[in-house]
Amino acid sequence: MSDEIANVQLFYGAGQPFQMAELPCPVELKAGEVLVRISLATICGSDLHSVAGRRDAPTPCILGHEGVGHVVSSNRIDVVVGRRVTWSLSVGCGHCQPCTRWQLPQKCQQIFKYGHAPLDDGSGLNGCYASHLLLRPGTQIYGVPESLSDVIVAPANCALATVVNALETLPMPCDRVLIQGAGLLGLYACAWLRQQGVAEIYCTDLSPARLAWVAEFGGIPLTGPQADRLSNLDLVFEVTGSSASIPAGVQVLRPGGHYLWAGMVHPQTKLDLTGEAIVKKCLNIRGVHNYAPGQLATGLEFLTRNQTVFPFEKLTSPAVPLMELNRGIELSGRRQWPRVSIKP
């Protein structure tokens, strides 16, 4: 039981500032519910798409879906009060074809996604830009190892788990890879592929500041002209969010190569591409969106094993107070850090 009041930042639409408000926390939890006090959240690129109007969001709502926190109250026997946890981005019904036959629970026909629900849906405590979050029945909840700091864990339940979804199974052979984009997904991908033993991991980005991170995470930074000289790659992984990068990716793949698309999650991604370019190279193209809950668990294991190998803590900014979320959004736009963190 809880009589706490949640401080929240409400989103009213593109171009409008976030507004602080208070919401009551549930006094009694329904079966399967868990109330979490957020200790740290991070600003994801998809949130920035919503703020900029590139992506629709129901309003008013509480954005934010990358986070970590402590259990305040629980109506689940497997989740204890006081435990530090993170959770799956989405909740599926467990019965429809995507959940069962197609092995795509993130495409459930009745999907619920944290940070993407309107304020009048349930308690309203649906996003991480708040002091509290109500986890719904069916949410996969994972305890966080004490060895992992909040700044390492917070982005895992979107960015890292999505990379795990994309790269958990690699094509054979997979010796030479190009990652298009040196944002957080691109850096995670460099580290993941390095630990998988991939020999050559190239990474491109338009930003020299972003490229400066690549070598620390096991990749080889390249500018656009340098990347144009690549050829016969086994795999290209797009995480730029821009369809303008696709023709170059097709060009550098070997016959039978694999192309993963994960960054183009907004409608402004029309492709300038011929079918012939794909067919004659016998290319394999796969779109990747979000992840299955078990891939978050795999991501947490990856962080635990490699926290001393790669400087994950450097990827997240010093915490911006929740009440200054508007400043945090502005700071994210400067791209000084792959993630800006928000602390209630």
Image (cartoon, rainbow, N blue to C red):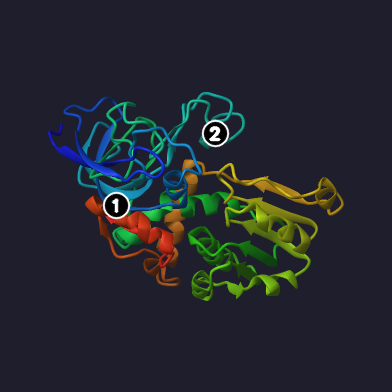
Quarter of image, res 206: bottom right
Which residue is the extreme one toward the left? 3
Reading the image, the residue beneath label 1 is 325
| Vertical arrangement, residue 280 with respect to residue 252, above or below | above
Looking at the image, which residue is at 58% across and 26% down? Answer: 97
Question: Which residue does the image show at 42% across and 49% down from the upper left?
Answer: 157
Residue 202 locus on image (x, y percent): 63, 70
In the picture as drawn, the residue positioned furthest to the front comes out as: 15
The number of numbered badges drawn on the structure is 2
Q: Is residue 234 visible?
A: yes
Tell me the quarter of the picture where residue 328 sits. bottom left
Q: Nearer the viewer, residue 18 or 342?
A: 18
Q: Nearer the viewer, residue 182 or 293?
A: 182
Crowd band around label 1 with a 10 angstrom C-alpha radius: few (<14), some (14–19), many (20+): many
Q: What residue is rendered at 61% in x and 54% in y? A: 242
Quadrant location of the N terminus in the rendered image: top left
Going by the numbered disc 2, the residue's amino acid type is Lys
In the visual, does 76 lie left or right of 92?
left
In the rendered view, would you say 67 is above or below 29? below
In the rendered image, the vertical position of residue 32 relative to residue 55, given as above or below: above
Secondary structure of the residue carrying tag 1 is helix
User: Amino acid type of disc 1?
Assistant: Leu
Q: Nearer the viewer, mark 1 or mark 2?
A: 1
Which circle's residue, 1 or 2, is located before the other in the chain? 2
Q: Position of residue 284 (x, y in %)?
A: 75, 49
Q: Residue 36: where, in percent of width, then height?
A: 25, 42
Left/right of residue 238 with respect to residue 302 in the rendered view: right
Tell me the residue that label 2 is attached to. 107
